[in-house]
Structures are given as structure tokens and as C-alpha cells.
């Protein structure tokens, strides 16, 4: 690192050789949790979940909560999508879904009591803006009646640019949202046609300008590389447009073509996908472009301008990670509402049913729609602490883990430390008697570094269910 004139560190761009990029062109988890959601079991159900809620209430502790609401509906199908969604033109379905969300909130209130403080609120999907303005207002009012939505918290919503205009953005601001995430993916018209998502660049530029004028604190855009019809040359043009747009944050995802798992992807022709070398070139070009434009590499797929809260949190060692990705909020329990939503309470994870019919049926019976989850073992907790320290702070101090979990780190993780030696030779990590430090080059492969400590992954080499780590 070097420093600017204010003494603030500037991230320098490491040399990312084709050999290292190729070596890490493998599938692996994103570690929004550990263990990952594919390890959840049906043996963990509503009873186990209610026990976790009761334990949260013991002793009168009231830690802040993160709240996620999943809205599954979309007007049209994007062929690349791997999210849990329901494509429909029947907007009347939103009102019914909203009623059941209210029932689910009632169940939480019955166990936790009213007035739990929410410091982070996120609406995802699907397309949250499938809801009308009045329905979004009703949702926010319902949440406000049951929880205390901290005015200084993060209140974010995912936005399909095709579903909003200036008036809608004004309403979102009035409802208390202070962060927006626009799904862009690619500005190239041929790529947009190939994935069935046409949205002119001018539309996105206008919306971002309006959002800035309305005072939204942070604006994110999502990009995907590896889509059909993409080439390094076409993606360079998209990167140049993103530079002009200059969002506060950029999420750059690798497209994972898994048509056997995700039916919409069967409409994408395999021969239209860029070859591995082209995909890696797009990644390398994007990293170089974002660095040249002054963005800080936060970790994994995320970049932010130096003054954005996410970049500041990384610089100050306050970065955290939850099911929505990187966050500035302290580690806390997460209530998740809606079909397929994943939450965390204490040392447990839980997931709602993925079927809308089953979701409604559970709530009709006055039951939480939890169908699977996991109670973490002691080993899970130790490894979660290690993996999240790597993913968020890029360093591990043996002593802090030893004191917190009463282990001898170097003995407990002796096989993992041996495996790290190859990464030490590559200059991706530094290991000494006191801890592990991810280098500036290593940040670009932090998922691969974290995978070394994933006991489940090391025992199961079937990684086809995961996306590529770069």
C-alpha cells in the first residue's frame, strides 16, 4: 500500500498472471455463511428454529437485527437468472403475498415481542419493485408497526431499471430507503437480447442521476461477465460506460452456466458463451479498469469508491459479511421473510420453503415456513470465525481465535496451514508464528484461500453446484 496526500492508503494493483488466474478458475462457495446453505438439513425445522428464538430472548438481551424480505415476482424472465423467482404479469398476486408476509411477521412478534431494533433492511428478489408504490408503502408501514427501523441504519432495495421512473425513485426515498442496487449486467444490446433483458444505457444513466439528486447515500450496479455474446471487446465498452456512470459500488459477478439446475439457462446456447480465456480476460480488464477509475477492491466481487461506507469499513477493519454479501453492520442475527429466504439466529441457520404454495400453507396453519436449516457445531463456529476473518479483514490472529474458542490454532489447523504453503509461494498469503495475512494479490482470490478451511468442501470434491470463484 502507498498513501495519498491525506495519509489514506491507496490500493495498488497487483500483477495477476494468466497462470494464477487459470489456477483459480474453479468453482467454490461465496461464503455468505459457513457452513454454506447446501449443508442445511431437513432435520432442522420449525421446532429447532423456535428454540433458537427462545434462546435469543433469554437474559433480556436485545441485539440489533438485520431484516431481509424476499419478493419473488418478476414481470419477465432473464435467462441467466438463478434466483428463486416467479415470472408473472398478474400483479394482483403481490397483494396476497403481502398479506402472508404480515402473517409471518406476526409469528416473529409472538416469539420476540414488538419493538426489536432493525439496523439493516434489505428487499431482494425477484424484483422488489414488482410491488406497486402503495404495496411497498404498506409493507414498510407493516414493518414499522412491528419493529423499530433505526433511522441511521442501511435500508436498501434491489431495482430493475425497467420498473422505475423518477416518481418511483422519489417514493422509495420517502419510504426511507437510502441505498439502491441497479441490475445492469451489461450495456451491450446484443448481450441484452441474448439474455432477454433489454434496457438502454440512457435509461440507467438517467435513473442514477435522479437517485443522486434525491440524496440516496449509496448506489450500486451489478455487472456479469461470461454472458452469451459477450467478448472482451464488447465488455470493454461496457466498462467504459460504467466509468462514466461512476456508481458508488460495483458488484462484478461471474456467470455460472448450470442449465441442469436452473431451467431459464436452458434458453442460452452454450456456443454463444465466451471461452474460458475470454472470460478471464474480461475479469482482468474489469479489475484494471476499476482500479484505474479509483475504486477500492473490497473483496470477492465487490468494488467501491474510497469514500463509500463499504470501502471505509474495509479500511478500518469493520467489514462484515452476511447472506446479502459485504456489510458495514456489526455481526447480528438476521430475520428473513418470504419464500426461500435464509436467516440466522444465534448459532443456527434456517431457510423458508421454496414453494409459494407451501409457504402460504404453513402460514395458514400458524406455523413458521421453515423447512431446513442447521445448528452449528463447535467446529463449525471455529471455522466460521476463521473464514469470515479472511473474507472480511484479510487476516487471522491465532491468539484471538485461541482465546475465543480454547484451541491451539496451529495444531487444530495443521493440515490447512500445510495446504496454504503453495499460496504463500504465489505471494497470496503470508503466514508466520502469529497469524495469516492476505496480500494485496491474495484479495482477488480470497474465496480460494477461505476454501482451504472449509471442512465440508475438502471432504466433498463435487463443486459443480457452485459458481466459479473468479
Image (cartoon, rainbow, N blue to C red):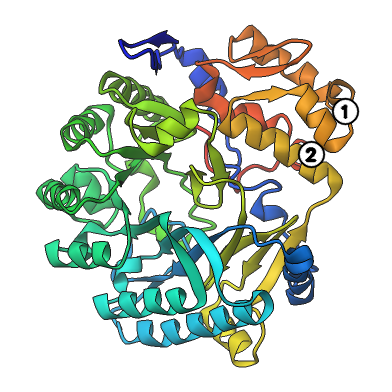
Q: On screen, 279 above or below 258?
A: above
Contact flag, marks 1 and 2 (Cβ < 8 Å) = yes
Residue 176, position as x, y percentages in the image: 32, 63
- Please tell me how crowded label 1 is: few (under 14), some (14-19), or many (20+) other residues with Cα within 10 Å: few
Compare marks 1 and 2 and give the one earlier in the sequence: 2
| Cα–Cα gap, marks 1 and 2 | 10 Å
Q: On screen, 142 above or below 63?
A: below
Q: On screen, 65 above or below 453?
A: below
Mark 2 residue element: helix
Say which residue label 1 marks.
Answer: 412
Question: What residue sits 58% from the left and 65% below the top?
Answer: 335
- The reply to whether residue 52 is in sight is no
**Pick the front one: 315 or 245:** 315
Residue 320, position as x, y percentages in the image: 56, 41
Question: What residue sits 56% from the left and 15% below the top?
Answer: 439
In the picture, the quarter occupied by the N terminus is top left
Residue 177, position as x, y percentages in the image: 32, 60
Res 382 label: 2
Residue 168, position as x, y percentages in the image: 19, 67
**Pick the front one: 166 or 111:** 111
Mark 1 residue element: helix
Question: What residue sits 19% from the left and 45% below the top?
Answer: 190
Instruction: State which quadrant residue 38 falls in.
Output: bottom right
Amino acid at each position: 500500500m502507498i498513501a495519498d496526500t491525506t495519509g489514506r492508503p491507496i490500493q495498488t494493483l497487483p500483477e495477476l498472471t494468466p497462470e494464477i488466474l487459470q489456477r483459480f478458475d474453479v468453482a467454490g462457495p461465496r461464503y455468505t455463511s459457513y457452513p454454506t446453505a447446501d449443508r442445511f438439513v431437513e432435520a432442522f425445522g420449525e421446532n429447532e428454529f423456535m428454540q433458537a428464538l427462545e434462546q435469543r430472548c433469554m437474559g433480556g438481551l436485545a441485539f440489533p437485527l438485520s431484516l431481509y424480505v424476499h419478493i419473488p415476482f418478476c414481470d419477465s424472465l432473464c435467462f441467466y437468472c438463478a434466483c428463486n423467482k416467479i415470472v408473472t404479469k398478474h400483479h394482483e398476486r403481490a397483494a396476497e403475498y403481502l398479506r402472508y408476509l404480515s402473517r409471518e411477521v406476526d409469528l416473529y412478534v409472538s416469539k420476540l415481542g414488538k419493538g426489536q431494533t432493525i439496523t439493516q433492511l434489505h428487499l431482494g428478489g425477484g424484483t422488489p419493485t414488482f410491488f406497486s408504490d402503495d404495496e411497498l408503502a404498506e409493507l414498510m408501514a407493516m414493518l414499522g408497526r412491528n419493529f423499530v427501523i433505526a433511522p441511521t441504519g442501511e435500508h436498501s432495495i434491489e431495482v430493475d431499471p425497467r420498473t422505475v421512473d423518477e416518481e418511483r425513485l422519489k417514493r422509495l426515498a420517502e419510504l426511507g430507503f437510502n441505498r439502491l442496487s441497479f441490475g445492469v449486467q451489461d450495456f451491450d444490446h446484443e448481450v441484452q437480447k441474448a439474455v432477454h433483458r433489454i434496457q438502454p444505457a440512457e435509461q440507467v444513466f438517467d435513473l442514477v442521476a435522479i437517485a443522486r439528486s434525491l440524496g440516496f447515500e449509496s448506489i450500486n450496479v451489478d455487472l456479469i461477465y461470461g454472458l452469451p455474446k459477450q467478448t472482451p471487446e464488447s465488455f470493454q465498452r461496457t466498462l467504459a460506460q460504467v466509468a462514466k456512470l461512476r456508481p458508488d459500488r460495483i458488484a462484478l459477478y461471474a456467470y455460472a452456466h448450470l442449465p441442469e439446475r436452473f431451467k431459464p439457462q436452458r434458453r442460452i446456447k452454450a456456443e454463444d458463451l465466451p471461452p474460458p480465456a475470454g472470460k478471464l480476460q474480461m475479469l482482468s480488464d474489469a479489475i484494471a479498469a476499476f482500479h484505474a477509475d479509483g475504486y477500492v477492491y473490497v473483496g470477492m466481487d465487490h468494488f467501491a469508491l474510497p469514500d463509500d461506507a463499504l470501502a471505509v469499513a474495509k479500511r478500518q477493519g469493520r467489514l462484515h459479511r452476511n447472506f446479502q454479501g459485504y456489510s458495514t453492520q456489526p455481526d447480528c442475527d438476521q430475520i428473513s421473510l418470504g419464500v426461500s429466504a435464509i436467516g440466522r439466529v444465534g448459532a443456527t441457520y434456517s431457510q423458508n420453503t421454496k414453494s409459494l404454495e407451501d409457504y402460504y400453507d404453513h402460514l395458514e396453519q400458524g406455523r413458521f415456513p421453515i423447512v431446513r436449516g442447521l445448528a452449528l457445531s463447535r467446529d463449525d463456529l471455529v471455522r466460521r470465525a476463521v473464514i469470515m476473518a479472511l473474507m472480511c479483514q484479510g487476516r487471522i490472529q491465532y491468539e484471538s481465535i485461541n482465546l475465543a474458542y480454547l484451541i491451539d490454532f496451529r495444531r487444530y489447523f495443521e493440515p490447512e496451514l500445510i495446504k496454504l504453503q503453495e499460496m504463500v509461494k504465489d505471494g497470496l498469503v503470508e503466514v508466520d508464528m502469529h497469524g495469516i495475512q492476505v496480500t494485496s494479490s491474495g484479495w482477488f482470490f480470497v474465496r480460494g484461500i477461505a476454501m482451504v478451511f472449509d471442512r465440508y468442501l475438502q471432504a466433498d470434491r463435487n463443486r459443480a453446484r457452485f459458481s466459479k470463484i473468479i
